[in-house]
Amino acid sequence: MAKAYTPGLKVAAHGTYRSRRLLPIKGEVLVKAGDRVTPSTPVARTYLEGEATPMKLANLLGAQPRELPSLMLKPVGSRVAVGEPIARSKGIFGMMKTEVKSAAEGTIESVSETTGMAIIRGEPIPVQVDGYIAGSVVEVIDGEGVVVEAQAAVVQGIFGVSGEASGPIKVVCAAPTEVCDTDHIDASCQGCVVVGGARMTAAAIKKAKDMGAAALVSGGLDDSDLRDFLGYDLGVAITGTEKTGLTVIVTEGFGDIAMADRTYHLLKGLEGRLASVNGATQIRAGVMRPEIVVPLDAAGVAAAKAAVAARLAASVAHEEGSLEIGVQVRIIRDPHFGVIGTVAALPEAPAVLGSGSKARVLDVKLQDGSVVTIPRANVELIEG
């Protein structure tokens, strides 16, 4: 059978999920191998250097830089408060002395008799890494962090903004084709990972944030609505650091696009379960997709395995990452951007495209029964 290989988004009812929870610099690991953690459990901690405030003390005192150490009222290593005197000139005949007060709170880090400057170092900035998912610590990386593992359902999106959040799944749209608007969002969404259907409107995003939702997930999003939400145009290929107060994940693409049936029904079946989400997206080297991770208990794992077995029995088994006849794909280029279909044929010979160039193509059977021929680079697998 003809086949090819293409990257895809994972939509899996069950699998082993591992998350590396690492500090930006060396620090202290707070848990040990075998410990159970929750999304909010602190697993590692470190401290970044506080802000440095330089002060031109020699200039302020009217002294030579080499005189500065002898004019300090506080030695290096001393803690000082804002406005506290830290240096005093000798004055004239012991009079007319000039006193300089600290411009910042912190510790006197250095005093230079070469430049005549002193550095006040602010309080260390604590950095803490949490567990992200409910699972078990399976590996401790000394001084750096841990690896947390769970049996979980995983749904990857195509685009997201803002970072990590967690909460129970709440499905608010009755069908994957239903637009998620303000009438779907109410006070019961507080703290939840809210799942819509098709496009989420700008008003729905704003209301979800106002209601205190942890995240909003839906099939599509208009780029103008995203701009309204963020307050600016995204001009980079990396997201996840936005401070919006709401994680937003799009599962299919930009525009009025319905959530894939398989994705919608998987999340619907997980309603009420605790989910961890991350909107971080990277579309250049080292691709990173936004995700919804739902850890499963023993009953959930058994149910997921049964569902997967039934689905595989009714479909063509295929090698992971391979394009084969019968597998489900999403088209990722216009004019069919976001449309879901199945591979109907994989012609061996390259075809001439409308642009005049040649490329390997495939035939995709769409949900309405029509078949379109497109370049293989214009699709991605929906992997289970």
Image (cartoon, rainbow, N blue to C red):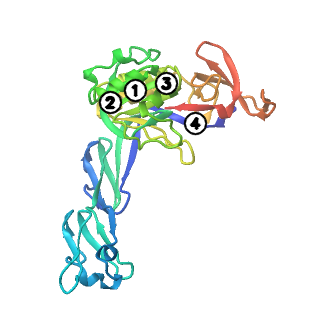
Above or below — where is 10 with respect to 198? Answer: below
Q: Earlier in the sequence, mark 1 or mark 4?
A: 1
**Between marks 1 and 4, how big is the CA–CA gap?**
20 Å
Circle 2 packing at 10 Å, graded few (<14), some (14-19), many (20+), is some
Q: Nearer the viewer, mark 1 or mark 2?
A: 2
> In the drawing, does residue 183 fall left or right of residue 7?
left
Q: Which residue is mark 1?
A: 306
Asked if the residue under mark 4 is in contact with the one under mark 2, i.e. CB atoms within 8 Å, the reply is no
Question: Which residue is tagged 2?
Answer: 300
Mark 2 or mark 4: whose residue is earlier in sequence: 2
Residue at image coords 34%, 79%: 112
Distance Cα–Cα, label 4 vs label 3: 29 Å
Whether residue 270 is visible to the viewer of this picture, yes or no, is no
Looking at the image, is 13 positioned above or below residue 42?
above
Residue 220: mark: 3
Residue at (61% x, 36% y) in the render: 322
